[in-house]
Image (cartoon, grey):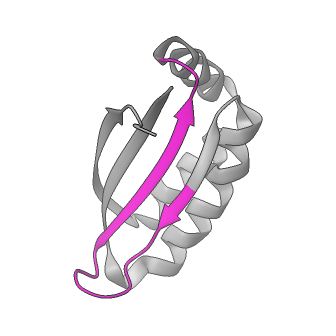
Amino acid sequence: MITCTIRYVIDPYKLSDFEDYAKLWIPLVNRLGGTHHGYFLPHEGANNIALALFSFPSLADYEIYRQRMAEDAECQAAFALAEKSRCIVSYERSFMRPVF
């Protein structure tokens, strides 16, 4: 199993736009073969950092997800929402493996 961890730098004045974006992605990732563990939005401390975590059985499964995502109309609409609102300033994607 691999877990994709995304660290977002967001515009704190557009937090509600980012939350709308996040709510779109959770079911999309799940529908396209992943397990979404949720988005984590600022509460205390930095007001411009958010996280997302979702897992796939393997990196190969993640790559299949990426291909399917690129062709999916709902995924493209989610990307367009973030682009239009400009709620995401930047992001970093890392892959981790869980230890149980």
Q: Residue furthest right?
A: 31
Judging depth in this view, the residue of 46 and 71 nearest the camera is 46
Farthest residue to the top: give it: 60
Question: Per the image, is 7 magenta?
Answer: no
User: In the picture provided, is 81 more to the left or to the right than 87?
Assistant: right
Residue at point 42%, 37% (across, down): 98
- Kindly identify the residue that appears in the image at 45 percent across and 54 percent down: 52
Q: Which residues make up the magenta segment?
A: 38-58
For the point 47% across and 49% down, which residue is it? Answer: 53
The answer to whether residue 30 is left or right of residue 88 is right
Q: How many marks?
A: 0
Which of 95 and 98 lies nearest the eye of the viewer?
98
Residue 44 in which image quadrant: bottom left
Residue that lies at the very extreme toward the front in this rendered image: 100
Q: Nearer the viewer, residue 71 or 37?
A: 37
91 vs 62, left or right, is left
- Residue 8 placement: quadrant: bottom left
How far across and down, in percent of the image, does residue 94 sit?
A: 30, 37
Who's the residue at 49% across and 68% down the image?
18
Q: Position of residue 55 (x, y in %)?
A: 54, 36
Task: From this view, report whether residue 84 is shown above or below residue 29.
Answer: below
The location of residue 61, given as percent across then percent down, is 58, 17
